[in-house]
Image (spheres, helix red, strand yellow):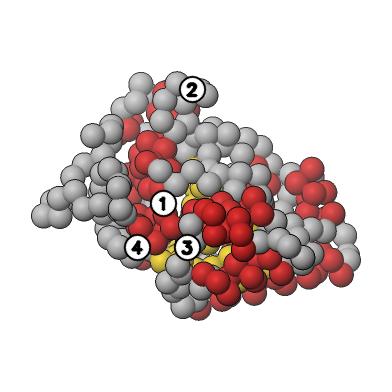
Amino acid sequence: MSAGSVPVSGIGHRGDGEGSSQVHMELPDDGMDRAKVFAVYGKGGIGKSTTSSNLAVAFSQLGKRVLQIGCDPKHDSTFTLTKRLVPTVIDSLEEVDFHMEELRPEDYVYEGYNGVLCVEAGGPPAGTGCGGYVVGQTVKLLKQHHLLEDTDVVLFDVLGDVVCGGFAAPLQHADRALVVSANDFDSIFAMNRIAGAIQAKAKNYRVRVGGVVANRSEETDQIERFNERTGMRTLAHVPDYDVVRRSRLQKATLFEVAEESEALQRLRDEYLSLAAALWNGVEPLDPSPLKDREVFDLLGFD
């Protein structure tokens, strides 16, 4: 059994899918149930942090109290919100020799743009340990300090398309899982595998697939082809406008960029519409992921 994992009393070791050897961490309970929780997945480099941060601000502009949790050891999920790389949970734990009881919320929670609260889980140096374990510890800290009780929305921004072990932990707390994908083979191939992981977790947890955020693509034909075949759904479409790149260089979200353009307004409206739809509740999906070879044969051939 991995560090920090515990059997669930009365449940035993139920598989999270055929061939699974994962163990169950603690079931979500106090605090998290009071918030709407979303986990954002997708291929590495596809724009999950950009999506998460702009979506967090959109929720805040709707008057919601928002907490964004970066689950990547690179700890760069929230820098457009805070304008810096904030100290991580693992940094703070090291400061107190890993005595969790000595930490205070101000040691690892930082307020970002428009009041969005930001936490970076962090992780060990590359090649030296399990970064996913820190995600579970982060959730424990947030519960211990009752930070989830006054939160309306929690966003987990999860590392790449890694869906094993600790990096799948957000699926054990989320109501809906979103997948960020471009209109290309690699992103959709990753989305298919992520959808399978979410479906496996859905057998034992409340998480359900919410849908796809089409990102960095002018067209969405390949995504829609995949959706039609598998039962997925596109929730939002964020084209590859240059203002997105420039906002990142400015260390700012799209809601802070000081310019007036149709492209920028379209992007802001898209995120606000997505936030409103998620808050009002999107119907859960029950997609049927394809075998790897089937994805290969389905896409392309324009």
Q: Position of residue 265 (x, y in %)?
A: 80, 69
In three-dimensional space, the C-alpha distance between marks 1 and 3, rounded to whole angstroms, equals: 20 Å
The residue tagged 3 is 289
Q: Nearer the viewer, mark 4 or mark 3?
A: 3
Q: Are marks 3 and 2 in contact (CB under 8 Å)?
A: no
The residue tagged 1 is 170
Q: Amino acid at mark 4?
A: Ala
Q: Nearer the viewer, residue 179 or 291?
A: 291
Residue pictured at 47% horizontal, 38% vertical: 121
In three-dimensional space, the C-alpha distance between marks 3 and 2, rounded to whole angstroms, equals: 31 Å
Q: Position of residue 200 (x, y in %)?
A: 35, 58
- Closer to the chain start, of discs 1 and 3, is 1
Q: Is residue 149 above or below residue 43?
A: below
In three-dimensional space, the C-alpha distance between marks 2 and 1, rounded to whole angstroms, equals: 22 Å
Tag 1, which secondary structure? helix
Tag 2, which secondary structure? loop
Q: Nearer the viewer, residue 56 or 292?
A: 292
Could you say which quadrant of the image residue 140 lies in?
top left
Q: Residue furthest left?
A: 10
In three-dimensional space, the C-alpha distance between marks 4 and 3, rounded to whole angstroms, equals: 14 Å
Q: Nearer the viewer, mark 2 or mark 1?
A: 2
Classed neighbour count for the residue bearing mark 3: other residues with Cα under 10 Å, few (<14), some (14–19), many (≥20): many
Assign the N terminus to one quadrant of the image.
Answer: top left
